[in-house]
Image (spheres, helix red, strand yellow):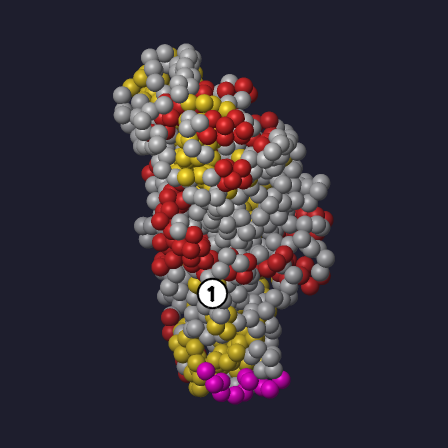
Amino acid sequence: MKKKYIVWILVLFGLIPESFSQEYVLDLSGVWQFAMDDKDVGEQECWFDKSLEDVIQLPGTIDLAGKGIPNELSPSLEKPQMLHLTRRHSYVGPAWYSREIEIPASWRGRKVSLFLERVMWQSKVWIDGVALEGVQESLTTPHRFDLPSDIRAGKHWLTIRIDNRKQYDISVKNLAHAYTNDTQIMWNGVLGRLELRADNPVFIEDVQLYPDVARKKVHCVVTVQNAGKRDRKATLSFCPKMLVEEKKLSSRLLTASFHPGRNIITYDYVMDEDAVLWNEFSPVCYQMDVTLVQGKKSSDFSTRFGMRNLSTSGSVLMNNGDRIYLRGTLECCVFPLTGTPPTDREGWNKVFSVAKSYGLNHLRFHSWCPPRAAFEVADDMGFYLQVELPLWSLTVGKDTATNRFLYEEADRILKEYGNHPSFCLMSVGNELQPDFDFLNDLRSYMKSKDNRHLYMATTFTFEKGHGDWPEIGDDFFVTQWTKKGWVRGQGIFNDEAPCFDKDYTSAVDGISVPLISHEIGQYAVYPNLKEIEKYKGVLDPLNFKAVKADLQEKGLLAKADDYLNASGKLAAILYKEEIERALKTPGFSGFQLLDLHDFPGQGTALVGLLDAFWDSKGIISAENFRNFCSPVVPLTRFPKAVYTNNELFEATVEIANYSASDIKNRKISWNLLYSGGESVASGYFDVEQIEKGKNSVVGNISASLDQIANATCLTLEVAVTGTAYKNNWPIWVYPENVVIDTGKVFVTDDLDEALSELSEGKKVLFSPPVGALKGIEGKFVPVFWSPIHFPKQAGSMGILCDSEHLALSDFPTESHTNWQWWHLLKNSKTLVVDSIAPVSSIIEHVDNFANNRRLVSIFEAACNGGKLLFSSMDILSEKSQCHPEVRQLLYSLLNYMNSDAFNPCSELSKIDLNKLVDSKINEVKTSSATSIY
């Protein structure tokens, strides 16, 4: 029974009793006896009282030991292999682990417990054939068992049964990342610390710390257990220290009497006047050492904390009174070598250090909660974390046993990790449905239990009547859209012509809590086949191997790196615009990328600019990514990507300053540059002050483009002089009065005309109406998420071209899609040319890796006695020719065709040409951003 006592507090300054000795911890790592219990007969047959036939190393897993059912699948573009990485060995069911232990004589009279840092999912324990009380079933916090109070010194037999079968209905299709084979695996074993601990009969069970930044104190709530049968008087000492400098603060003592059972003691520790506050720029952590002394016996408890006060002010997210902006990505328990999350700091150091190098300050743990080491590293690096209960379900609230488990898991997470300053946000789970009464009640329960964090009922939802506006009682709101519009590019970038002067202000108008955009990005990148050699652990990349084999069979393997680069560059361009729109929106408090690194599950969702190991794919450097993802980001607003040389280029320059301080007395420079570095126009703005915590307009740019005679791509650069903060944007400038001279080329959109002219040996540019083409929908954006998970989408991943091809001499382009291609791609179809003779492509497309088809938009071939250049992009219609880039591409193609260089070497038959064009013009159907669902 919990009892709260009024205690007499004696504050003293002086010596602190010596720390709890390590001799009272017994490490149990090593070789254990082991057996799999696939028929679940172990308890009935008393395996806890027997020697087991096999051995295994703990901490570890059955997968790591190479035990279980061996994989028999081979690489194939089929669903089992393409859904996720494949376990080399797998086992789901009960497993038994046993070994001899020896209780030291020095532990006599002490309370002995067993500590298992992380287990999936249920554990039971026997000592000398006798079951210990209780069953542990947390997916996110340590499992703890008390050994018998009368256990004697000497040798004993310890047996653990771990059952990794699904215990509760926490997810749809086992997708919740706490229990899945899509990212981590359904492992069986023990991770992290595995040890026996001995403590005094009167001992500290828990310490929770509640910083009060305004009053510069820490409210300490200490739980003390008295395992005896009578009251015991003891002294508690509180001694914090600054971890960075190992600077100890003064110790404070209080004395109290502890009744048998659980006792709750509260104490307010007043910090020094110069106590350092915790934030992303100064992540100073303290450690509170609490010691209970009873005569010559002592019990110690140490926990870290930070002086951090997370709050909201309307739609603004605050830490210690300063506005913060979350630049985040997801972490879905993706650790491909082990299939398990690291429990040591080293494993998490890479995750957070790479994320920080890319300008991030926030990680969201999607439908799971990481081990303690993750929080410790995040504390030290200044990351704001969102954790979630292990829940991604469409049946929320329907099962009472699951409901109980979720409440208990919430209690465990808050108790185990609640002191960490990096633990900032908590959600009940991901995209939850349908019972919002249950979700809101659980969120309210967590809020009432622990006020150190901000809470939300669900991280987005597709449930009708919810998800487009915050739930009453939510502290913050994570969503894809509101009832007023999209707040991520998925619903915009393919439907609206490129413009860089827009944000999401109208969509967030009226939102009264901080809004964070949900899982922005999800732009699929072609697999990096060189990554295959990295998979030396428990997971076999059959998905990658299948793609490689398919390319090999189709003679396309040499293009794999080009596919990766072209699709990756497009993804990086889109991620940049996603982030900048979010930063431009005054009512935003952050974004959560999906993802900076790859997600190898859910149909091989390779949406990252980094691979699953947090290593670069060579798409964009951390330095260049920080140009648009940093505490300070120069931004510009201008209305379009393409200009003509009779226009003014006008832009507004802004600085998003979410750094630790105001920017004072700086010049903001701008420069409009040719590709060779020569300046077209430049200038600067003298700025006295740019306030922190907001996005500020610093000036307007106006530059004439009339000096530009030829088609060119300019780069606008904006920089905060004297700092590393800079950013850049491309704009394309074309001659307004470009003269379209067909010369000796016959230009037509009619198949019969084209064949007739070709038969006379002429050069023909043939661009049929889009409705007459046989092909797939022309799109600017690439595959969303995964072509396996969402098969109902057009399915290409951007263009691939030789930017030096003579046909493009007068149409500046990179080898990949950029914004100047938007109208051309939207008014097109992509041709599938597998069934025709090989043609010489000028503009080809990267197909999704589930199909690996040959896709083209513009190609050349000798055909029907003449020379053909075929364009499935609409470059002839009056509607299309109102766009300067369309006219310019036509101009460039005609110049090429009228030159001696136009001499196609491939041959296309009349029959094959007919395969690409329908006999009638059909309605052009386009898909919406949500049609994939």
Q: Is residue 49 magenta?
A: yes
Q: Position of residue 114 (x, y in %)?
A: 49, 73
Q: Which residues are magenta?
A: 43-54
Q: In percent of the image, x 36 and y 40: which residue is there?
A: 620
Quadrant of residue 303 within the rendered picture? bottom left
Q: Is residue 58 magenta?
A: no
Above or below, 566 against 334 in this view is above
Q: Outermost residue toward the front?
A: 760
Q: Position of residue 561 (x, y in %)?
A: 36, 47
Q: Position of residue 661 (x, y in %)?
A: 39, 31
Above or below, 464 against 202 in this view is above
Q: 769 or 223, which is in the foreground?
A: 769
Q: In percent of the image, x 53 and y 76: which residue is there?
A: 95
Res. 900 visible in picture: yes
Res. 448 visible in picture: no
The residue at which mark 1 appears reads as 74
Q: Judge from the rendering whether residue 576 lies leftward or rightward of residue 806; answer left or right.
A: right
